[in-house]
Image: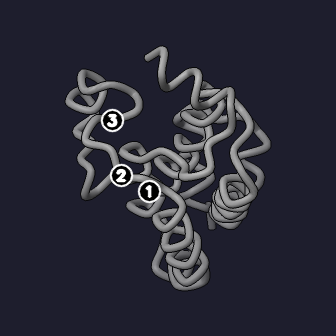
């Protein structure tokens, strides 16, 4: 039996490290991002957006994962999401920009990770946000 999540990642052109990690690997990656934000995000905006894209990819695979896969990982996703929401200051504008948000159909309610900045953003991220 093929893994629909790995198939989706492969079709989307994701790197082999993401494909081989599958659904559990995506969840683990998101947990690491949340831990990094909790410790203080010391990278710039491009890196932060890349890390947020990991959560978007996780959202996308939820629509193709089989119920058993979701059941195994849902609690971890919910815990990481709750933790991340507490670490972010909500913004009205998408960090990718309003044009991208509109093209992708992203909203603050559904794709909240793109509509917040870390409360403890490091200097590089603050500088990038101020310049944007």
The percent coordinates of residue 103 (x first, y second) are: 23, 27
Depth check: 104 or 88 in front? 88
Question: Circle 2 sits on which residue?
Answer: 90
Relative to 75, is 115 on the left or the right?
A: left
Q: Residue at x 54, y 37 (%)?
A: 11
Question: Circle 3 sits on which residue?
Answer: 94
Total number of numbered discs in the rendering: 3
Marks 1 and 3 in Cβ contact (< 8 Å): no
Going from N to C along the chain, the mark reached first, 2 or 1, is 1
- The Cα atoms of the two marked residues, 3 and 2, are separated by 10 Å
Vertical order, 111 against 124 (above or below): below
Relative to 71, is 112 on the left or the right?
A: left
Q: Quadrant of the C terminus?
A: top left
Vertical order, 85 against 49 (above or below): below
Depth check: 41 or 14 in front? 41
Q: Residue at x 44, y 63 (%)?
A: 62
Question: Circle 1 sits on which residue?
Answer: 59
Depth check: 86 or 110 in front? 86
What secondary structure is marked by label 2? strand
Judge depth for marks 1 and 3 and give the one in front: 3
Judge depth for marks 3 and 2 and give the one in front: 2
What secondary structure is marked by label 3? loop
Q: Classify residue 104 by image quadrant.
A: top left
* Label 3: few (<14), some (14–19) or many (≥20) C-alpha neighbours in 10 Å: many
- The Cα atoms of the two marked residues, 1 and 3, are separated by 17 Å
Vertical order, 29 against 75 (above or below): above
Going from N to C along the chain, the mark reached first, 1 or 3, is 1
The percent coordinates of residue 131 (x first, y second) are: 48, 14
What secondary structure is marked by label 1? helix
Q: Quadrant of the N terminus?
A: bottom right
Q: How is the image coloured?
A: one colour
Relative to 14, is 89 on the left or the right?
A: left
């Amino acid at each position: 039996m093929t893994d629909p999540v790995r198939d989706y990642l492969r079709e989307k052109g994701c790197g082999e490290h993401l494909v081989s990690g599958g659904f559990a690997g995506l969840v683990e990656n998101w947990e690491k991002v949340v831990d990094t934000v909790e410790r203080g995000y010391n990278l710039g905006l491009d890196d932060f957006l890349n890390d947020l894209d990991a959560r978007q990819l996780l959202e996308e695979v939820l629509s193709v994962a089989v119920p058993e896969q979701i059941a195994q990982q849902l609690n971890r996703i919910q815990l990481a999401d709750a933790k991340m929401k507490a670490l972010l200051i909500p913004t009205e504008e998408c960090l990718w920009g309003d044009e991208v948000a509109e093209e992708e159909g992203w909203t603050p309610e559904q794709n909240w990770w793109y509509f917040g900045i870390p409360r403890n953003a490091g200097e590089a991220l603050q500088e990038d946000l101020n310049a944007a």
